[in-house]
Image (spheres, coloured by chain):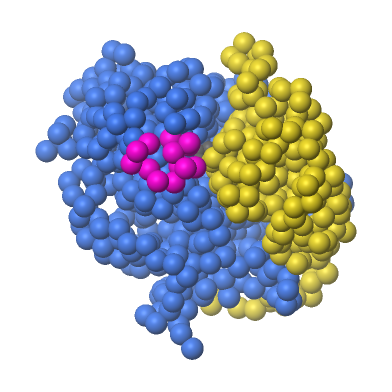
Chain colours: A yellow, B blue
Amino acid sequence: MQPFTTLTATAMPLRMENVDTDQIIPAKFLTAVTKDGMGDGLFSWLRYDDKGAPRPDFVLNQPQFEGAEVLIAGRNFGSGSSREHAVWALTEYGFRAVITPGFADIFYNNSLKNGLLPITLPEATVNMLLDLVEEEPEATIRIDLDAQEVTLPDGQRFGFAIDAFRKHCLLNGLDDLGYIESNAAAIDAYEARPVY
Amino acid sequence: MSGQTLFEKVWDAHVVAQESGAPAILYVDAHLVHEVTSPQAFNMLRARNLTVRRPDRTFATMDHAIPTRDVDIMLWPSDAAIQVRTLRQNCEQFGITLFDIEGDVQGIVHVVGPEMGITQPGMTIVCGDSHTSTHGAFGALAFGIGTSEVGHVLATQCLLQQKPKTMAINVEGELGFGVTAKDIILAIIAKNGAGGGAGYVFEYRGSAIRNLTMANRMTICNMSIEGGARAGMIAPDETTFDYIKGRPYAPQGEEWDRAVTYWRTLVTDDDAIFDRELDLDANQLAPMVTYGTNPGEGIPVTGHIPTVDEIEDAAVRRSLISSLEYMGLQQGQKMAGQPVDVVFIGSCTNGRIEDLREAAAVVKGRKVADTVWGIVVPGSKAVKSQAEAEGLDRIFSEAGFEWRGAGCSMCLAMNDDKAGAGKYVASTSNRNFRGRQGPGARSFLMSPIMAAAAAVNGRVVDVREEIG
Ligand code: SF4
């Protein structure tokens, strides 16, 4: 897993609530047996019309937001299907962090396992960030995972919470498997006990 | 010290190790696998030279991408054929039991698991699929995981998990005529919001829940995820034990007795405390129907779509406006009378034999409206053959429905069962997301009897006026 330490980047405003994983990556892109190419399917329905032409009113198609590595969106982001493909699509497209007032549980977990940093901030703060980025697309946001802080160009800072263990894994690019495997003796012991 | 909730009992029984400041290492009793979310996990095993720790606790089926028409999957011009072949190879290589589309047992993973007796009280069950919550109907702790986690479970039979909070959902009273389990869960989500359960495990309690069949309990637990909760549980009781007894993977003989003795302890203690509670009066419920693009946007069929003035929360207002724009509906509009173009009866929410019986009773001797394309998709091969033995297939076919093979079908429209752009779908499935049932398709979620009544009328109706 790619470690996450700090990020200074522009952001893309997606002013929508309840962005479900079917929106992030529609089912037709789930037929792959590898992770490659998911970025092309990112937000496919919102991004293209039924003829496959880009919709100019959708943020991903707007040149001022090109190169953004932070996505800002409304509450209950990533709801619905457990498809990790949604996270793969976001990371392959180039996003490294998502800021919302709240994530669906499975999406949140999947993000952490792929080095995509999910940041939860109060809704009023997220709305303010959306306003800022819509008005000044060139504004760079700095995210410091170790300090658990988001800093705006004018110096305003917002702290965010993250589980200490998850933070450690992200900072060092560690995945769960090594940790679980280091407890092999405990797993053996667990399996040896009677169930009922 | 206060007592424990059902969830806490099952959780505690599965903690393999717990360091302070770290998530728990949780043991997984049963791991269900399907063709869509597993290939990359098996690739990870190969890349790291790992094996499957407990192939005997791992079960695979094919359901999401497969066709439900009577065609040879291998001749099917689709990537689905590659996924099916990949799953076969993976199961063969790693020694996993596969319920193959070519065999006698196959269907939607959340229908097949309980049917085979794999799902049992007190177990931890995971699958790379969010509707794994279905299995909580047996008093199991069951939840969906991502593909990375599928890989972890394959390799170690364990997962790293943060302990969720608990929410009691108390449903007291008696369901009125024409009101079903689907209406209970749609009402809960409408009340608590599509994201309202994030971070919680639900426990459904109360007299209205205890009176439900296993199929109905599964309908409710299935949609826990639509309320934002990863898992939903119902304490096991005689109804549960009766359902499991004699199924292929159920304990037998003396082991059965020991199992039932243990299962009876899996109830929330009287003095246990939940982090949150929510009450719902079953007597007050009417058949529900959704009008928007998330499952929380639902109303009684007797009601009207809210107007922005009725909503205080700015985000909910914004969501309503954008949902209605997509759906082509108006604020304040009644849902009763709204035309539908497609009717889909099936899915892991409502594709069981009980659901098909109820829907068949409504359509019997009637015709699907000329303007409607209707399909009925059994949740598994066992459901299909049972329905055929009871003549339900003929009732549906004579009414003008297409009678299909088992699979997910138009629930996620990954195969060729898609509603067209702009079409209105009366659906017994669980998600009314934009395009979920086909690009541009617009879904109304409802119970099987409501969907059946919509099919014969060509529009949304209050099923209570149709039967009785
Ligand atoms: S029927 Fe629908 S919700 Fe259920 S497993 Fe299949 S796609 Fe998922």
User: Which residue in the rendered view is the most extreme toward the bottom?
Assistant: B1
Q: How many marks?
A: 0
Query: Residue B170: x percent and y percent?
Result: 33, 64
Residue B131 shows up from this direction: yes
Describe residue B316's horizontal placement relative to residue A57 as left or right: left
User: Which residue in the rendered view is the most extreme toward the top?
Assistant: A51
User: Which residue in the rendered view is the most extreme toward the front?
Assistant: A154
Describe residue B294's horizontal placement relative to residue B180 as left or right: right
Q: Does the magenta stretch include residue B317?
A: yes
Q: Relative to residue B443, is residue B60 depicted above or below?
A: below
Q: Image quadrant of residue A17?
A: top right
Query: Residue A102: x percent and y percent?
Result: 59, 51
Work out which quarter of the rendered image holds the C terminus of chain B and state it: top left
Identify which residue is drawn at 56% across, 25% down: B415
Describe residue B223's horizontal placement relative to residue A9 as left or right: left
Q: Image quadrant of residue B444?
A: top left
Q: Is residue B374 magenta?
A: no
Magenta region, mostly helix, strand or loop?
helix
Q: Relative to residue A142, is residue B448 depicted above or below?
A: above
Query: Residue B81: x percent and y percent?
Result: 66, 27
Toward the viewer: A153 or B135? A153
Query: Residue A23: x percent and y percent?
Result: 59, 32
Toward the viewer: A145 or A132? A132
Identify which residue is drawn at 79% across, 72% down: A183
Q: Image quadrant of residue B82?
A: top right
Identify which residue is drawn at 39% across, 82% down: B271
Over which residues does the magenta segment extend?
A: B308-320
Residue B345 shows up from this direction: no
User: Which residue in the rendered view is the most extreme toward the left?
Assistant: B468
Identify which residue is drawn at 26% across, 30% down: B334
